Amino acid sequence: MHRKPTIKSTFKAFLYLLPALTIISTFSFYPVVRSLLMSFHTDYNFFTGEVYSYGIDNFIYIFNDPDFWLAMRNTFLFVVGVVPAAIVISLGISVLLNSKIKFRGLFRTIYFIPFVTSVVAISIVWSWIYHSEYGILNYFLGWFGIDPIAWLIDPAWSMPAIIIMSIWRSLGYNIIIFLAGLQNIDKKYYLAAQIDGASKWQQFRNITLPLLSPSIFFISIVSLIGGFKVFDEVFALFDGRPGPVSSALTIVYYIYEKFYMEWEFGIASAAAYALFVITLAFTLIQMYIGKKKVHY
């Protein structure tokens, strides 16, 4: 274990890693580099691979495209609507599931099922829930005197419908991570707080939250990145459309439309790298804040 690496041992280790490196390079690194080059192709024959001219026209196009900015607005709305709510709700449920309640194991399984269920199956169920006339959600809203809402037809309700479904779907993964963090907190801290007369809220604020901050930080990073990449939920819930009159158009759906439907490969690549820069910027900001707020 303490031997110094030699040329022979390094070459042997490289041979073991070669199959994995080949797969990663073929399906990850090469597409990333290729798409970066394509974003600067202004006149390009995709089938022959012949490039006639280069430039930044693709970036100029997306920054002047109203659909691109609509997609960015919807994506930011999705992230703001899903990430904080999902973290708060899943944290509350995790605290309850970590306490001594009946059927705790059953509840953990129920909350985790949506995470391992396909997005298509979930979207089919939620399309029934959102049905304007027979949906169970409108039925419950009727108890409070609220008129039926056209969740999947009215453009004003397309993004709220996606946000609600996505919050519900993300709970399972978040709860598992939070439960792992909660179970690693030593019980002696709570016993000492009880001896000092601390209330449940004081224990949660001064013990649970600080010691759970690494888990909160991890989930916030993963949720933020996943939120910017939202596509499956929109595609499945609206039957392959970005909602009525593009009301649920997201940045990844915009890239999908440009690449697969309009065959504008350079524009799609430019939009993909614009999304990459935005996601990277927000991730770095979170990591900077996390260094000051997270307690390890």
Image: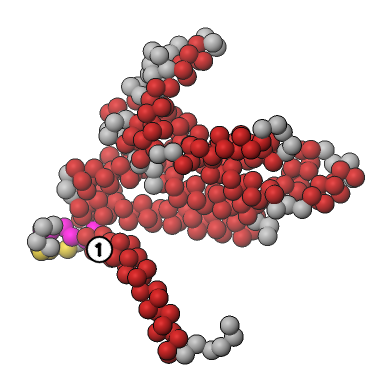
74 and 2: which is toward the camera: 2
Q: Quadrant of the N terminus?
A: bottom right
Magenta segment, principal secondary structure? strand
Q: Quadrant of the C terminus?
A: bottom right
* 120 on left or right of 53: right
Note whether 182 is above or below 15 in the view shown: above
Give the residue displayed 30% in from the left and 34% down from the top.
Answer: 242
Quarter location, residue 38: bottom left
The location of residue 18, given as percent across then percent down, is 35, 74
The residue that disc 1 covers is 34
65 and 295: which is toward the camera: 295
Give the residue displayed 45% in from the left and 11% down from the top.
Answer: 147
Give the residue displayed 26% in from the left and 45% down from the top.
Answer: 256
For label 1, the SS is helix
Quarter location, residue 25: bottom left
* 45 on left or right of 184: left
* 75 on left or right of 182: left
Q: Residues within 10 Å of mark 1 (few under 14, many from 20)?
A: few
Give the residue displayed 24% in from the left and 58% down from the top.
Answer: 39
The location of residue 150, given as percent across then percent down, is 38, 18
The structure's colour scheme is: secondary structure
Please name the amino acid that badge 1 sits on.
Arg
169 and 20: which is toward the camera: 20
Q: Is residue 280 visible?
A: yes
The location of residue 67, given as percent across then percent down, is 28, 39
The location of residue 152, given as percent across then percent down, is 35, 24
Q: Is residue 33 visible?
A: no
- Is-magenta flag for residue 41? yes
Note whether 166 is above or below 62 in the view shown: above
- Is-magenta flag for residue 36? no
The magenta segment is: 39-45
